[in-house]
Amino acid sequence: MTKKTGKKNSQDQIAEILEGIQSESRVQEMKNYIQHGRTTTYEHCENVARLSCAIDRKLSLGSDINALVTGAMLHDFFLYDWHDSELSLESLHGFHHPKIASQNARKYLDVDDRTSHVIDTHMWPFTITKIPLSREAWIVCVADKAVSLYETIFRR
Ligand SMILES: [Fe+2]
Ligand SMILES: [Fe+2]
């Protein structure tokens, strides 16, 4: 995958980072799973990545764009159907999936600590001890909730 560093939040840089992640076949597998309503996990993650970048840009937060985009695109990279799996109780899935997603992100895309922290903490405050401690983690944590609400209500 493309390893980009730096803080420039431009459409070109976002597209380049997303392209690098989305070219991985394991990431494409997220198209096979439904996240909310009619939205696949892949679409959901891309929506969170785009909203995260918009929040960073609007509020001039100066995030590390590689950690922000990569963390957002892989925050639900757990690769199973949470509606059917043994973890089908939403509470169990909600509790366990950030760790599974970050393990997959490290295994398949060799992400760094800053990025895996974004993934590990995105369910806070549900995962009470996994507190977001970076601006990228906070942005993805908030963007995920907003996008999930929108998809659940308007994309049924
Ligand atoms: Fe999640
Ligand atoms: Fe999510």
Image (cartoon, rainbow, N blue to C red):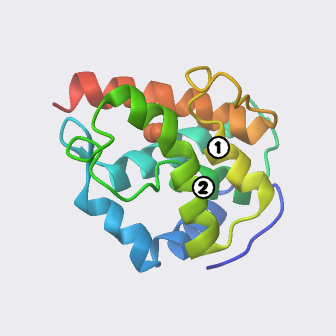
Q: Which residue is mark 2?
A: 102
Q: Quadrant of the C terminus?
A: top left
* Amino acid type assigned to the residue bearing label 2 in the image: Ser
Kind of element beneath mark 1:
helix
Query: In 3D space, how far apart are the residues under numbered discs 2 and 1 (Cα atoms)?
Result: 6 Å
* Amino acid type assigned to the residue bearing label 1 in the image: Asp
What is the x, y in percent for residue 86?
28, 45
* Residue under the image location 65 percent in, 21 percent down: 128
* Residue under the image location 59 percent in, 60 percent down: 103
Q: Between residues 28 and 110, which one lies in front from this camera angle? A: 110
Where, by quadrant of the figure, is residue 118 drawn? top right
Where, by quadrant of the figure, is residue 39 drawn? top left
Q: Which residue is mark 1?
A: 120
Q: Indicate left or right for 127 with 37 as reference.
A: right
Q: Is residue 76 visible?
A: yes
Q: Residues within 10 Å of mark 2 (few under 14, many from 20)?
A: many
Among the two numbered marks 2 and 1 on one chain, the one whose residue lies closer to the N terminus: 2
What is the x, y in percent for residue 61?
79, 35
Q: Are circles 2 and 1 on residues that touch, CB within 8 Å?
A: yes
